Amino acid sequence: MRTLFIIVFICLAGIFLCVPVLHAQQIDTTVYHQLKGVEVVEKARPSTTREATPLQVMDRSGIERLGIQDLSEAVKRFSGATVKDYGGIGGLKTVSVRSLGAQHTGVSYDA
């Protein structure tokens, strides 16, 4: 009998505590303002993005200014690029951009 009384008391207390919360959620206090019109007075700026994929370029003057002797040194200067060296001078080197993997990265150069 005592257990039944406790269960009924908890249920009634829960109902009485939830009623104010549920009632408070029915009141809408949002104020809406209707705009008559909008006038744009500035010209649209052209987009600076021309490529769908990111492209980084280093020209001859940049290579000479930085004193770069090897193509892998030039690639290391690009943001997000990681060069792994397997064997020193003349050895295998792999390039990955932002940990995407060497099989998804392309490096091209024009001598």
Image: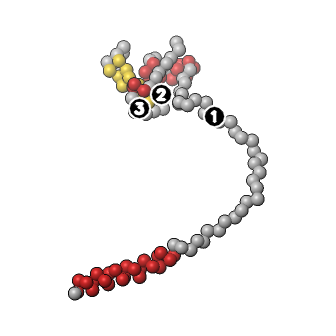
Disc 1: which residue: 48
Expressed as whole percent of the image width and height from the top left, the position of residue 75 reads 46, 24
Residue at image coords 28%, 81%: 7
Expressed as whole percent of the image width and height from the top left, the position of residue 74 reads 47, 23
Amino acid tagged 1: Thr
- In three-dimensional space, the C-alpha distance between marks 3 and 1, rounded to whole angstroms, equals 25 Å
Q: Is residue 77 left or right of residue 84?
A: right
Most foreground residue, 111 or 50: 50
Disc 2: which residue: 77
Instruction: For mark 3, give the secondary structure.
Output: loop
Residue at image coords 36%, 25%: 84
Dot 1 or dot 2, earlier in sequence: 1
Q: Is residue 101 visible?
A: yes
Disc 3: which residue: 100
Most foreground residue, 90 or 1: 1
Dividing the picture into quarters, in which one does residue 31 lie? bottom right
Residue 92, compared with residue 10, is above or below; it is above
Amino acid tagged 2: Arg
- In three-dimensional space, the C-alpha distance between marks 1 and 2, rounded to whole angstroms, equals 23 Å
Dividing the picture into quarters, in which one does residue 72 lie? top left
Most foreground residue, 90 or 41: 41
Q: Is residue 49 left or right of residue 35?
A: left
Viewer-nearest of labels 2 and 3? 3
Instruction: For mark 1, give the secondary structure.
Output: loop
- In three-dimensional space, the C-alpha distance between marks 2 and 3, rounded to whole angstroms, equals 17 Å
Instruction: For mark 2, give the secondary structure.
Output: loop
The crowd level at tag 2 (other Cα within 10 Å; few <14, some 14-19, many 20+) is few
Q: Image quadrant for the N terminus? A: bottom left
